[in-house]
Image: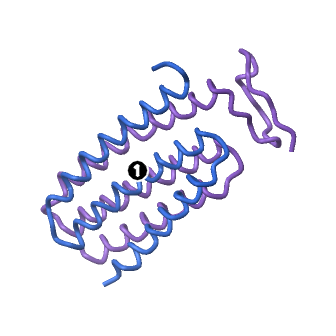
Chain colours: A purple, B blue
Amino acid sequence: MAVVGSIVTGVGSIFLFLGSLGVFRLPDVYNRLQAGTKCTTLGAFLTIIGVGIMQPGWLLKALLIAFFILLTNPISSHALGRAGRKSNVALWGRSVVDKTQDFGGYRKEPE
Amino acid sequence: MSYPVFLAIIGAGILLCLLRMLKGPTTVDRAVAVDTTATITTALLVLLGFVFRRYVYLDVALVYAVLTFIGSVAIARYLERGL
């Protein structure tokens, strides 16, 4: 059981690192938001569940924390993306499609 | 046994988020970096609670997750001029 929990925790921490690497390296607010939300949600979920597997007495509260992160992380990322759109942050120059051009839209910045 | 490796990986991730927070061109970039750092810190608190064998750290992580969620939503509402 300890080996399984250790493997799950390791995979989760690797996902956390990859998410923050995406936050560091991607070119745009919206790309960074996507990397920093999805990878981090999965990484935190796997890390907390792995701790709950390694220590079975803690599993209920670990599940509670993981479910809370799974529920609230998309809400805050949606609010941040909406804030970027409302405060007129420009897209990356090589972005392909922009559906918000139908109602006002962003300015595209040149490369 | 292998927990220092996990802690080092997660610490490197927090360091990259802090660099983006220092560098980010707009305010929304910094808010995204803060939100990512908060989620990583919640997972790190649970892992530290396992390493130190303290059950209280799970409560700390739960309260930290609630408070940073409220903070991120408040910052986002402020940036879109709705607060």
* Residue A74 horizontal side relative to residue A50, left or right: right
- Percent coordinates x, y for residue A37 in the rendering: 50, 46
Q: Is residue A83 toward the left or the right of residue B60 in the image?
A: right
Looking at the picture, tell me which residue is in the foreground, A19 or A8: A19
The residue lying toward the viewer, choosing from B8 and A59, is B8
Determine crowd level at label 1: few under 14, some 14-19, many 20+ residues with C-alpha closer than 10 A. many
Extreme residue in the top direction? A103
Residue B2 drawn above or below residue B7: below
Toward which corner of the image does residue B70 lie, by quadrant? top left
Location of mark 1 (residue)? B38
Q: Is residue A16 above or below residue B51?
A: above
Q: Position of residue A79 (x, y in %)?
A: 50, 30
Quadrant occupied by the C terminus of chain A = top right
Between B34 and A16, the residue placed more toward the observer is B34
Residue at 76% in and 41% down: A92
Instruction: Using residue B13 as the reference point, say whether residue A55 is left or right of it.
Output: left
The chain containing the residue under callout 1 comes to: B
Q: Amino acid at mark 1?
A: Ala
Q: Residue at x 31, y 40 (%)?
A: B67
**For the view shown, which residue lies furthest in the right direction?**
A110
From the image, which quarter does the N terminus of chain A lie in?
A: bottom left
Q: Secondary structure at mark 1?
A: helix
Q: Nearer the viewer, residue B30 or A97?
A: B30
Count of marks overlaid on the render: 1
Q: Position of residue B60 (x, y in %)?
A: 22, 53
